[in-house]
Amino acid sequence: MRKIIDFENVSFRYADKEDYALRSVNFHIEEASLVFISGRSGSGKSTLLNVLNGIIPEVIEGNLEGHILIDGEKDLSIADRSLILGNVFQNPRSQFFTTETTAELVFALENYGLAREDIEEGLDSIIEKYNVAYLKDRNLFEISSGERQLIALLTVLIMNPKVVIFDEPSANLDYGNSMRLRRQIIDLKKQGKTVIVADHRNFYLKGIIDKVLLLENETVKSFESEEEFLNYTYRNRSFDLFDEECQATYSRPEQRKSGLSLNNIVYKNILKGVSTHFNENEVTTIVGVNGAGKTTLAEIMSRSIRIDKGDISLDGQALYLMQDADFQLFGASCLRELEITQKDEELNLAALESLGIGDLKENHPQSLSGGQKQRLQMAIAKVSSNKVIILDEPTSGLDKDSMEKVVSMIGNLKKGRTVIVISHDYEFIRMVSDSIAYLSDGRIKDKFYLNDNNIKKLNSIYKEMEVYYE
């Protein structure tokens, strides 16, 4: 089969770094194949993708060595690559140029100078094909993160590229949307497109991967099949989402005291009467489909937005750590970031070390990878004195080891606190949760302690999410 991408002895060093981020990288990718890029948080996956799409070194400066062939052409410019490679970034906001969904979908077509009728035809075709009429003419900042990611994908597909590249596509997707992404990837392959996916969560790719590129020790190890990769000694996220490896040791406090209560919370047409409570010394995970209102509920509990009706009862102010870390990282370094919350430097250093980012203490937060930013946010929670902690997708972009460190940290964090988690990460949910609150149709549809008897109930909720998108 014909090669569409070929890396020949490629190395890269960032302009302000002495050490190489990538060394002697050699691999090729064939047409109409699905390639899965794996590696621990901060191993260089995003660097590799930026080298591939030309952002490195044309936008991000550094020393790039070796040669890259794309569609048979050597060392193409970023502009030429954009006609072949379509990129869906880890943070969809970073690739939007407008504030409205329809305008965003046609933005690239307009920039390439297509006639109005051709633009309208392209828009109608993509909306019909992916059944997303409900996303037309919407404010990009008012739709859910999963819906923003879908818009980002459609802005790529509308240009009909030969290669589609996904960076952490499942990080903020519910189970149903993840499985819909699987069906979309299968469809792209049938169309003859090459699909490259860099991700930690991989259950939605089981059985359809043709090649795996594993980043270790600043280079790339290539596996020619999914089976070959699974036989390699590497602590990978589970390919079997509902297997027993996700089993947790469930606990329920003997004495329960409410740390935060909600009574008939109404907000616009999103929340229609939410009544529930969250106990101290427990971790309650709020689950639901993308767009159900989970993040809105978190913003209400942290008093970031004003409700239309209802009452909120809690002691003090809740600490809300957002899904998008970029919105609340302000420090000049990771250590300075923690000092905004806690002045004890020894305690701050210990928090960074416990999450495996102690060596990054002097790095600027915005220079970190997505997974490293998530861990920095968890360190903020660890040193906080707030009695109510709300964590929105705390394992987004985290590998298995980092996810388990977060589980351990939350287990300690809940002592004397009320911890509320919003997550789509099933492995993490089963490992960290004492109870589950299922948000659906603007209300808490079900709430239950997570124990062996209720695992089937949690599984059925996930299956319900999958049906929701069919």
Image (cartoon, rainbow, N blue to C red):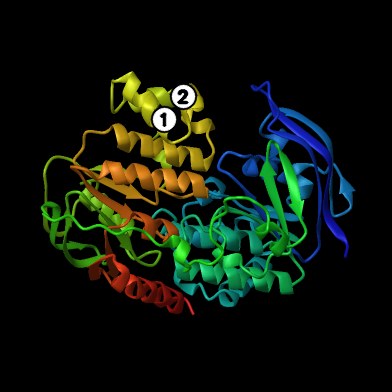
Residue 268 x, y percent position in the rendering: 24, 63
Residue placed most toward the observer, 296 or 63: 63
Residue drawn at x 51%, y 25% as measured from the top left:
359
Q: Amino acid at mark 2?
A: Lys
Position of 71 with respect to 194 (left or right) is right
> Is 78 placed above or below 291 here?
above
Judging by the rendered image, the residue that carries numbered circle 1 is 352
> Is 151 placed above or below 330 here?
below
Q: Badge 1, how many Cα within 10 Å: few under 14, some, many 20+?
A: many
Residue 452 x, y percent position in the rendering: 32, 69
Q: Is residue 397 visible?
A: no
Local secondary structure at mark 1: helix
Position of 266 with respect to 55 (left or right) is left
State the separation of the CA atoms marked 2 and 1: 7 Å
Give the number of the disc on residue 412.
Answer: none
Judging by the rendered image, the residue that carries numbered circle 2 is 361
Q: Quadrant of residue 86?
A: bottom right
Q: Earlier in the sequence, mark 2 or mark 1?
A: 1
Local secondary structure at mark 2: loop
Q: Amino acid at mark 1?
A: Leu
Residue drawn at x 88%, y 49% as measured from the top left:
73
Q: How many marks?
A: 2
Q: Quadrant of the N terminus?
A: bottom right
